[in-house]
Image (cartoon, helix red, strand yellow):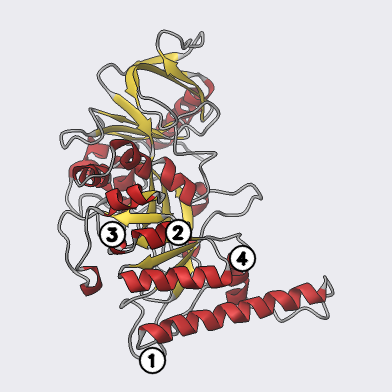
Amino acid sequence: MRCTIGCLAFVVLWRSLSLAQDTPQAYVGARIIPMSGAEIPDGVLVVHQGKIAAIGPARSTSVPAGAQQHDAKGKVIMPGLVDTHSHIGGVEGADSTAPIQPDVRVLDSINVRSPGIQKAQAGGITTANVMPGSGHLLSGQTLYLKLRDGGTIDDLLIRNGQGKIAGGLKMANGTNSRRAPPFPGTRAKSAALVREQYVKAQEYREKIRRANGDREKMPERDLRMEALVEVLEGKRTVHHHTHRHDDVLTAIRLAKEFGFRMVLQHVSEAWKIAPEIAASGFPVSLIVLDSPGGKLEAMDVSNRNGAVLEKAGVLVGFHTDDSVTDSRHFLRSAAFAVRDGMSREKALEALTISGAKMLELQDRIGSLEAGKEADFILLSGDPLSVYTKVLETYVEGKKVFDRSDPKDLLFATGGYGASRGDELHLDGFDEEED
């Protein structure tokens, strides 16, 4: 088949990316915020074959022979940001037929060519928990994604140690999931319906145990129950949308009753019940707003939540809930929290390693340490400064955003419709049709 100029350009690009992975890359002279220790004023970060090969002060960290060096003086390097609650990719989940649909997988509905993914890269986000909406008590299985450049969903998947696709389960309570039948009309009925389903899942699991591998005795396969059994067995974390203090306590009550792992999402009134949240042991993923409003149940939201929860000893992360908060401005979540009393250290952790812990990926991402995956961002200045810009974003050592590229700059600075969702983005390369 004839290879056009666009085809040849793709070959050149692919070879250059492969070469960059084979040749050690050394970023020299930056102020490095590793999240695994003290900041390094004049540091060296060495990346090789998608992993961090070395990191440390320039005076004591050797640059491998033959490495390609990048002058990063005057810049800041920190881990790629982890968004623990996002809706990028035009994701869809459950429909209006029932309030509980744990069999639904967002894997089947994400558009990886959506410009929202490139915009998240422009904001320094390298990992995201992509979830369905919160209009259901159980609205489906979430997906943990690496924001690599890719043409299909398989290019962005994260797999756990057992080789399974990594993700959680979305739950919600409060006003979002209350409406006309078959949905519940009250908070109490909402909890009752959830409790009923988990009891059924316990019974389904027991039938499987009693069958002991005998196919004749196995219950009829139930995809809904399979997902809930994964939750009961600790194989899938619940990410629970909840705002009002009483709704938060209901979520905690249900998780304790059935013994599942959970991340509390949003938690607008966390400041009212911080001791109770701390006693539960569950982490909290906060949304930090510059213009509070909207939901009636979120009317008492406070940007002091981060500080209050930190003082109580709760593991705190941040999320965008994109498009509620634009992924391109994720760094400001930490800045707002610090302004309202949260420590700098914990606010930066909330953007990185704390989020990684909530997704159970802390051994791979969230901090800059030798052996971890090379997800990092290059900033023009301090991450909490309003003047700071994300200059470059790297996922597993590959550059996925470069502000100096005019096409990437459009994703970083343009308006809501600043890019065409039907175009595949590969480091600024547009493949021409044959």
What amino acid is found at the position of numbered circle 1 in the picture?
A: Pro
The residue that label 1 is drawn on is: 181
Q: Which secondary structure, mark 2?
A: helix
Q: Earlier in the sequence, mark 4 or mark 2?
A: 4
Mark 3 and mark 1 in contact? Answer it, CB < 8 Å. no
Which residue is the site of mark 3?
271
Residue 127 coordinates in the image, percent (x, y): 42, 46
Q: Amino acid at mark 3?
A: Trp
Going from the N terminus, do you reach mark 1 or mark 4 first? 1
Q: Nearer the viewer, residue 287 or 12?
A: 287
Q: Are marks 4 and 2 in contact (CB under 8 Å)?
A: no
- Residue 332 at what x, y percent from top left? 23, 44
Q: Which residue is mark 4?
A: 230
Find the distance from the CA under tag 1 to the CA under tag 4. Answer: 28 Å
* C-alpha span from label 3 to label 4: 32 Å
Please give the residue where the numbered disc 2 appears in the rendered image. Answer: 279
Q: Secondary structure at mark 4?
A: helix
Q: Which one is earlier in the sequence, the residue at label 3 or at label 1?
A: 1
Q: Amino acid at mark 4?
A: Glu
